[in-house]
Image (cartoon, coloured by chain):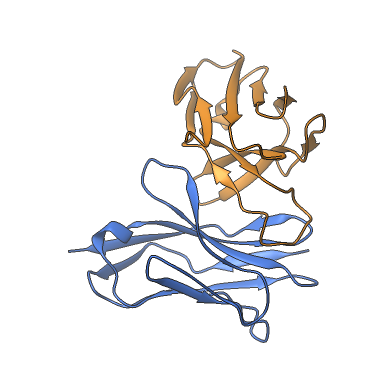
Amino acid sequence: GDSVTQMEGPVTLSEEAFLTINCTYTATGYPSLFWYVQYPGEGLQLLLKATKADDKGSNKGFEATYRKETTSFHLEKGSVQVSDSAVYFCALSNYQLIWGAGTKLIIKP
Amino acid sequence: NAGVTQTPKFQVLKTGQSMTLQCAQDMNHNSMYWYRQDPGMGLRLIYYSASEGTTDKGEVPNGYNVSRLNKREFSLRLESAAPSQTSVYFCASSEVGQGWGSGANVLTFGAGSRLTVL
């Protein structure tokens, strides 16, 4: 069946560092791919999405490109801030919605 | 602009007690979901309702029941709480349901309900 694998956390970076959180997937057909973010004490909220191969989703300085050849949707940001500290979830929507386990990101000033 | 509202935010139960988590959305979404979130296990789907009048089991339905009261409201009931049900519960809604494989299946989440069963 479909699955999503994210890099394990926590990921700890200094402010202004470059961020990559890896996400790979297994799916039949042509799923849509999502990144959600969960700030401390809150529910999840959509960060960005991509609905077809080579699409790039972007929001708040974060980007992810739907790579069908490598079945990946890695999340990147050029310069992280303390306020980016959160848990990030990769997900795919196909015949059902499948979630990754989440990656906790800690940004130190 | 409330979005998805869950009550209560916190609850402590004793083993064997029952309770209902309430969820309401004001976005005219068709589909609603209940998830639980446990450390190291990500999100697991308990039940979902693709549309008003329908409910289906998710990955971990045992020990829970749901009611889609109307288009806005979707409640989760624990009939006899167990310590294994200690978790953070999230309600969510979406315009379209699972299985559409489209970018329209974007979920809006509530703030969560933290339940502790002693």
- Of A12 and B102, nearer the camera is B102
The image quadrant that residue B75 belongs to is top right
Which residue is pictured at 47% across the width and 65% down the height? A8
Residue A97 seen anywhere in this rendered image of the structure:
yes
Residue B61: x, y in percent? Answer: 73, 35
Q: Is A95 rendered above or below residue B116? A: below
Which residue is pictured at 78% across the width and 37% down the height? B51
Residue sitting at the far top = B17
Question: Position of B27 compared to A87: left or right?
Answer: right
Question: Position of A109 compared to B101: left or right?
Answer: left
Residue A21 seen anywhere in this rendered image of the structure:
no
Residue A57: x, y in percent? Answer: 53, 71
- Of A25 and A58, nearer the camera is A58
The image quadrant that residue A79 belongs to is bottom left
The image quadrant that residue A109 belongs to is bottom left
Which residue is pictured at 82% across the width and 33% down the height? B54
Which residue is pictured at 72% across the width and 24% down the height? B70
Q: Colour of chain B?
A: orange
Q: Colour of chain A?
A: blue
- Of B50 and A74, nearer the camera is B50
- Of B20 and B39, nearer the camera is B20
